[in-house]
Amino acid sequence: FSADVERTEINDESDPYPFLQNGQPGGLNISNVGYVGETISFEVTLDKEPVAGFYSSDTLLTKGCSIDFFDDSFCEVDTWEWTFEGGTPASSSDQNPTGIVFEETGAFNVSLKAKNQFGSNTLTMTNFITVSETVLPIVYFTTSDTLVCSGKVIVMNDLSEVCPESWNWEFTPGSGIEFVNGTDASSQNPEVNINEAGIYTVELTVTNANGSSSLTKEDYLTIGGLSAPYVEDFENNAISINSWTVVNNDDFITWEDFFATGNGGFGAAGIDNFDYYKFLERDQLISPPLNLTGLENDSLYFDHAYALKGDILQYSDTLVVKLSDDCGESWTRLLTLVEDGSGNFVTREYTNVRFVPENADDWCGSGYGSECNVIDISQWSGNDNVMIMFESVRIMGNNLYIDNVSVGLSVSVPESGINTDKLLSIYPNPNNGLFEVSIEEEMQSGVVSVYDIRGQLILVEQISTGHDSHIVDLSGNPDGLYFVLISSNGISRTGKVVVR
């Protein structure tokens, strides 16, 4: 036990812990009192006979199955007297007896008598053990990870119950499967190296003395990465649950899920640079592995929001974007963003308070500063084991946010390499689903296409020849971020729109 105590409460120097000496219950002993900082620590013992308690590794068995028992008594125990009806051995004085075998069918009692110098207590559990000639294994298994890079070792963990004796593991498709480290398909907990990217079904068949049972988990393992197009909108604590990795959690500050609005939702990944006092500290936010096989649009897109902390440019933090095609063993730098005074990184004016985006104007592409980001990744098209890293480098700045990361969305990438072509106008933006799109040239025959954040085409409309603008109605669709593509006059313009 420990207690936080103000030093001013201790007035009697001859007895620095007087509050511990008053009102002690009978049989309660306090000893080894210590004082560390503002905390009092002490040991408490109770002069009382034990309260017996126990549990076992299993209670439903087959004939000839051995199980283990574990003492769970309260108060200090000096001796243990176990009795196992129908068991071999029939008794034990060990605290935690192991290898107790039950050879006959039926229901059996188990007793434990726990003793110490103050007395004893006995617990008898009636029909605690059941031995059956018909019960089959209850099959269950897990793995160290269900989303892994190809060529990485996966440990399969059997958690089956009712006296399993043998195991058989099957992986579908069966190509590219390699059992390693001395294990094979009949091992209880095999280690597997899967060399071919894809989605695998796993089946485990377990046999006990009475027969066999199987469990099949369809599409259980994703090897080589999630298929593109891939989108992460960082809603609902996505970093925690969607297999993103965070590196460098020092001072309890690093990339985390933030509440941030104005960008098609209520969440974003962010880092609290405002309260981060380490200079040039680097923190990495790394995506799950991605499989770019069959990718049609070879681009990486993401939104960001950032404001300087003060109006001095050398206080700008840095965002570095990297890509790995070997599951994080090595990295290629794709983009470096650091504010140079041209508005190439900031999305809002500087502020001396903590920056938190609240509306669309706080994000990239709003017209104040930085455009959003589209990066050509065509040289990695067709690869698996691809990972994307967002690395922040803190100087002395403000909070930084990332949102709506997408790889391979079916939206054209402007030649300028930015998300929103300045020759495309979307008004109003954000809106309630009804908005107007236009380009500088008079629009001729062509089409307007709208894609959702997952890259799915949700609307295609013909452009009326000779009109300056075109009205789009998304009011029947969910709130969120959408991409707009106009193809007219032999040119294409892209932009994003927020519906809320």
Image (cartoon, rainbow, N blue to C red):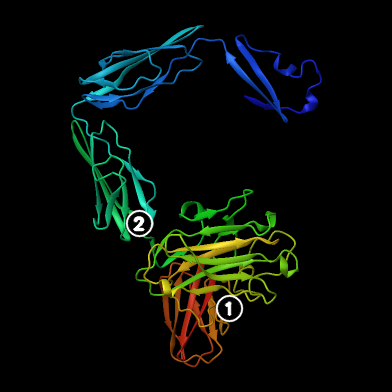
For label 1, count other residues whose C-alpha is less than 10 Å away and answer few (under 14), some (14-19) or many (20+). few
- Answer whether residue 414 is visible to the viewer in this image: yes
Question: From the viewer's perspective, is residue 347 above or below residue 285?
Answer: below
Camera-near label (2 vs 1) is 2
* Residue holding disc 1: 427
Q: Where is residue 334 in the image (x, y as percent from the top left)?
A: 52, 71
Residue located 73% across and 27% down the image: 5
Residue drawn 36% across the image and 60% down it: 224
Callout 1 secondary element = strand
Relative to 496, residue 110 above or below: above
Q: Can the viewer see residue 410 in this picture?
A: no
What amino acid is labelled 1 in the image? Tyr
Distance (Cα) linking label 2 and label 1: 49 Å
Q: What residue type is labelled 2?
A: Gly
Q: Which mark is residue 357?
A: none
- Image quarter hosting the C terminus: bottom right
